[in-house]
Image: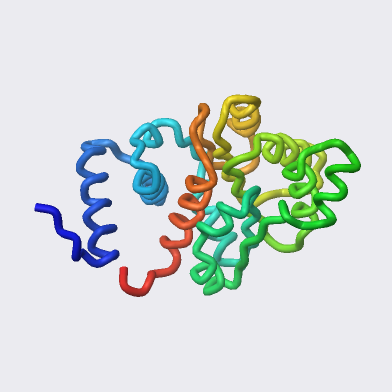
Amino acid sequence: MVNGRMAPAEIEKRSFEIITAELGERTFAPGVAEVVKRVIHTTADFDYADNLCFSENAVEQAKKALSAGATVVTDTNMALAGISKATLAKLGGRALCLMADEQVAHEAKARGVTRATVSMEHAAKRNGPLIFAVGNAPTALIRLHELIEEDAVQPALVIGVPVGFVNVVEAKELFLGGNTPYIIARGRKGGSNVAAAIVNALLYQLVKREGF
């Protein structure tokens, strides 16, 4: 029987019970399971149990940065909208997206590059711990990797989950096995909703939500 009167917390609780049951005997490192399950909850796609790649201690390093008031930089306003800013604010952090910034737009047009490229350059100049959540633009991920190579930025975490067909797989592969902490979705799958889900999964391990 369909129950249309379930509270949001009940729906989420039941959803995660179903996800856990369908994952069966699969096991994950501490903190990783919460990320994997929330991405599956967001997408209803169990492929993420296999294609999400975590650098060693990525979750713990990310949680440490968030606890220190990290700034989360996204490459889309959609990802920005999906992140729980209230939860982030409780830790003294903030989220931002520079894609609609007039200076970024003007510079990108003048240089003949994408706004995503320029937005990463501007964000890299921000003070404090930085977490980059890229869910759409492989050019953002490529430029971010270049900035890291140039020692222009040292991210606390790179969430690399752009979706698509052109340069997407190659952009993600740049980070695998590298020294920068990362959570990468190998292959073509991803998206702004996945990027936001990963950030939220990290946040919810640190801050208990009211009503959940």
Q: Residue at x 22, y 55 (%)?
A: 14
As rendered, which of 192 and 123 lies closer to the eye? 192
Residue 194 position, x and y percent, is 48, 45
Res. 138 image quadrant: top right
**Which quadrant of the rendered structure holds the C terminus?**
bottom left
Residue 114 shown left or right of residue 109 in the figure: left
Tell me if residue 62 comes above or below residue 134 in the rendering: below
As rendered, which of 153 and 5 lies closer to the eye? 5
Q: Residue furthest right?
A: 110
Residue 132 position, x and y percent, is 63, 50
Residue 158 shown left or right of residue 35 in the figure: right
Tell me if residue 142 comes above or below residue 76 in the rendering: above
As rendered, which of 53 and 79 lies closer to the eye? 79
Residue 115 position, x and y percent, is 76, 44
Q: Residue furthest left?
A: 1
Q: Is residue 177 visible?
A: no
Tell me if residue 129 comes above or below residue 172 in the rendering: below
Tell how many labels: 0
Residue 134 shown left or right of residue 200 in the figure: right
Tell me if residue 9 comes above or below residue 199 in the rendering: below
Q: Is residue 24 visible?
A: yes
As rendered, which of 72 and 82 lies closer to the eye? 82
Q: Residue at x 62, y 58 (%)?
A: 72
Coloring scheme used: rainbow
Q: Residue at x 38, y 69 (%)?
A: 208
Residue 210 position, x and y percent, is 36, 74
